[in-house]
Amino acid sequence: MMLRRWIATGMVAVATLGVLNAVPAAADRPYDPAAQTLRTLGLRHGLYIGTAVDTAALNDPADPRYREILRAEFSSATAENVMKWEALEPTRGSYDWGPADQFVAAAQRNGQRIRGHVLVWHNQLPGWLTTGVEDGSIGTTELREILRRHVTTVVKRYRGKIWQWDVVNEAVSDPWDTPSTLHYKGFWARHLGPGYIADAFRWARAADPTALLFYNDYNIEAFGSGDPADDKTQFVYDMAKGLLAQGVPIDGVGSQGHLGTQYGNFDTLQVADALRRFARLGLATAFTEVDVRSRMTDGVQAGDPEEINPRLQASAANFHVLLQACLAEPRCLSFTVWGFTDRHSWVPGWFDDPPEGLATIYDEDYQPKRAYQVMKADLIYAGPPYVLPRVAPKPRR
């Protein structure tokens, strides 16, 4: 509570700008871009500013502020968890569409474009599937058919309602994995081989000819050595290029953008270069899960401004780098933060040794942080000749 009070007090002047743009300016009042929402400012550039949606918060009658900010500030929405396989099909052959349908309906009421997340991932799989493979009751041929049926069923369910699908998520290893040479990792690669990636895109396209189909991964914000043995961005670039050469209907690559203030990270020119290289392949790009976490030291938790201030500034700088690079590349279609408030952030529950937090653009009391204001400034002051109109792709056939 001490930390929340400090951030809120320090942001009083910022908060007076107004989070919501509910009342239009009077005719005799000059236009004030700082009073506009991220949603409105992003659409000036044809760029969709999105957020992951926590459906528990969305449905909490005691938390109306969550719904107000969600509706006002964001022009696209991603389900944080309710469209993942374990949530959709907890029992084999029996789908629970309720939460996902509710999310889609809420986004439609808000006039938001929807990013579907996620069709094929090695995490958050239903227990019946992983157990069946482990005990041998589900063989390779059946497993491939189960995957085909899942992709087809889900995409058809939401056909015409999803703007971008994360078709395959996090299929590539990291240099710190074993072996250290980059490779296709996870449940699906082990049991079906890397060919499942092309299959998934083809199945998704057959189920919905209008959705944009994305590969999505983390740690691909910028190129490194250029050697696909240890440069993950290069590995993903080569993979995407290979899929295109095979006629696979991949439309885009999503860079998650999970960053931390304790790391060196990248500058705008490095990130813009990566986006540009993917664009030269004819692919759209998007930042899909952006947050910037910080170590929650004893000083931070006690509310020490000398420890909090540098972290808030470093966080804002990282949001700025990614957003500025996206604005500079016309094929970067959307910029999605992975939750907008520390009140409902996944970070503290996942990074707890040592503890991390402060990852989003609003604090726990829904006060906008420096990162929010920097994003707003980027959207206000960006323009030609460096920010050009978005290039709207057509789904690849």
Image: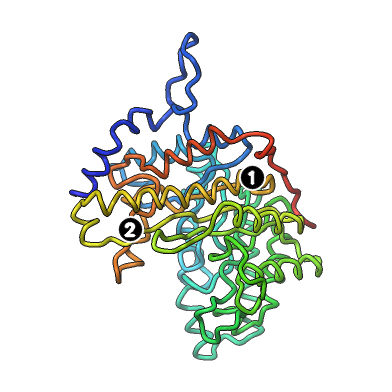
Type of amino acid at the residue the image marks with label 1: Ala
- In the picture, residue 267 is in which quadrant? bottom right
For the rendered model, the colour scheme is: rainbow
Mark 1 lies on residue: 328
Of circles 2 and 1, which is in front?
Answer: 1
Give the mark nearest the N terminus, 2 or 1: 1
Q: For the image shown, how many numbered marks are present on the structure?
A: 2
Q: Which mark is residue 53?
A: none
Type of amino acid at the residue the image marks with label 2: Gly
Mark 2 lies on residue: 357
The location of residue 125, given as percent across then percent down, is 49, 72
Element under label 2? strand
Residue 285 or residue 137, whichever sits in front: 285
Q: CA distance from mark 2 to mark 1?
A: 29 Å
Element under label 1? helix
The location of residue 32, given as percent across then percent down, is 47, 22
- In the picture, residue 390 is in which quadrant? top right
Residue 39 or residue 268, whichever sits in front: 268
The location of residue 241, given as percent across then percent down, is 75, 67
As drawn, is 101 to the left or to the right of 372? right
Question: What residue is drawn where x is 45% and y is 54%?
Answer: 338
- In the picture, residue 292 is in which quadrant? bottom left
Graded by Cα atoms within 10 Å as few (under 14), some (14 to 19) or many (20 or more), the crowding at tag 1 reads many
As drawn, is 189 to the left or to the right of 69? right
